Image: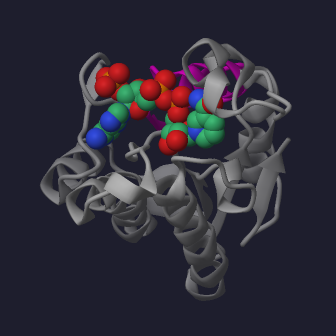
């Protein structure tokens, strides 16, 4: 399969590339430090990347930024960061990317545990992750030509505990290699409309 991974240089993306590259042609893209550059918040940038690659069997997003902070001080502009970046960015990838996929191709997005297991300072992240998961369930009903869509929703990564650990007290962390296997299941399996919770 020819698989495009956007966010390929990140903590999750690196593990996904390592898992999939054993069996497939993987094209790695990221925002600032990769062979292929793309900004998922910019529709023209996504189109330019997809045009430069041509037909694909799988499109993967392991990226998306959101604002974390106390609700009492949260502004609409801060809330919009996650809407424009993690939510709309991945939705745009799916909307544009469906037309570049071969028959029976797949789209796999990334959300996160906060959609159903919230933390303090995480109202924006919970809303965005929940919206991505709802989008995927509904989009699966309409995608044509056997194209599938799923979302991977991991707990905090073990590799990220040094950065986020204090916000996730009491949560079980998951290693990136386990998260990567959920992407493998989405791409190499047959399911669609699924939320793969890696807990
Ligand atoms: N880490 C965790 O514990 C965890 C847990 C659950 C869910 N998640 C979710 O998983 C996703 C990835 O997390 P991560 O920890 O792997 O992130 P990360 O290590 O910060 O990596 C982010 C990746 O996305 C790329 N990127 C950033 N902004 C982009 C943009 N506008 N357009 C295209 N690419 C962009 C980065 O490229 P550059 O480096 O070139 O900028 C990098 O390759 C996020 O949505 C996060 O919320 C993470």
Q: 179 or 93, which lies in front? A: 179
> In the image, residue 59 lies at what x, y percent?
51, 50
**Residue shown at the point (61%, 59%) measured from the top left:** 106
**Residue shown at the point (77%, 47%) measured from the top left:** 188
Q: 56 or 174, which lies in front? A: 174
Quarter of the picture containing the N terminus is: top right
**Residue shown at the point (65%, 87%) measured from the top left:** 141
Q: How is the image coloured?
A: one colour
Q: Is residue 8 magenta?
A: yes
Can I make out residue 2 in this image? Answer: no
> In the image, residue 142 lies at what x, y percent?
57, 87
Horizontal side of residue 59 vs 35, given as left or right? right
Can I make out residue 199 in this image? Answer: yes
Residue that sits furthest to the left in the current view? 44
Residue that sits furthest to the bottom in the current view? 142
Q: Is residue 80 magenta?
A: no
Magenta segment, which residues?
A: 2-29
**Residue shown at the point (40%, 47%) measured from the top left:** 66
> In the image, residue 108 lies at what x, y percent?
60, 53
Looking at the image, residue 24 lies above or below residue 59:
above
Horizontal side of residue 53 vs 121, given as left or right? left
Count of marks placed on residues: 0
> In the image, residue 3 lies at what x, y percent?
54, 40
Residue that sits furthest to the front in the current view? 72
Q: 134 or 103, which lies in front? A: 134
Q: 106 or 42, which lies in front? A: 42
Q: Quadrant of residue 17?
A: top right
């Amino acid at each position: 399969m020819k698989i495009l991974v956007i966010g390929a240089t990140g903590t999750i993306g690196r593990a996904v590339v390592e898992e999939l590259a054993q069996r497939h042609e993987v094209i790695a893209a990221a925002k600032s430090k990769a062979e292929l550059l793309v900004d998922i918040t910019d529709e023209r940038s996504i189109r330019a990347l997809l045009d430069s690659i041509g037909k694909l069997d799988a499109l993967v997003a392991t990226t998306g930024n959101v604002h974390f902070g106390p609700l009492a001080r949260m502004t609409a502009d801060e809330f919009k960061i996650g809407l424009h970046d993690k939510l709309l960015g991945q939705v745009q990838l799916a909307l544009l990317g469906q037309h570049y996929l071969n028959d029976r191709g797949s789209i796999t997005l990334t959300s996160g545990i906060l959609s159903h297991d919230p933390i303090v300072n995480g109202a924006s992240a919970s809303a965005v992750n929940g919206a991505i998961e709802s989008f995927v369930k509904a989009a699966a009903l309409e995608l044509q030509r056997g194209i599938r869509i799923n979302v991977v929703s991991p707990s905090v990564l073990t590799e990220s505990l040094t950065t986020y650990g204090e916000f996730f007290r009491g949560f079980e962390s998951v290693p990136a290699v386990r998260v990567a296997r959920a992407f493998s299941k989405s791409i190499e399996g047959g399911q669609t409309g699924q939320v793969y919770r890696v807990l």
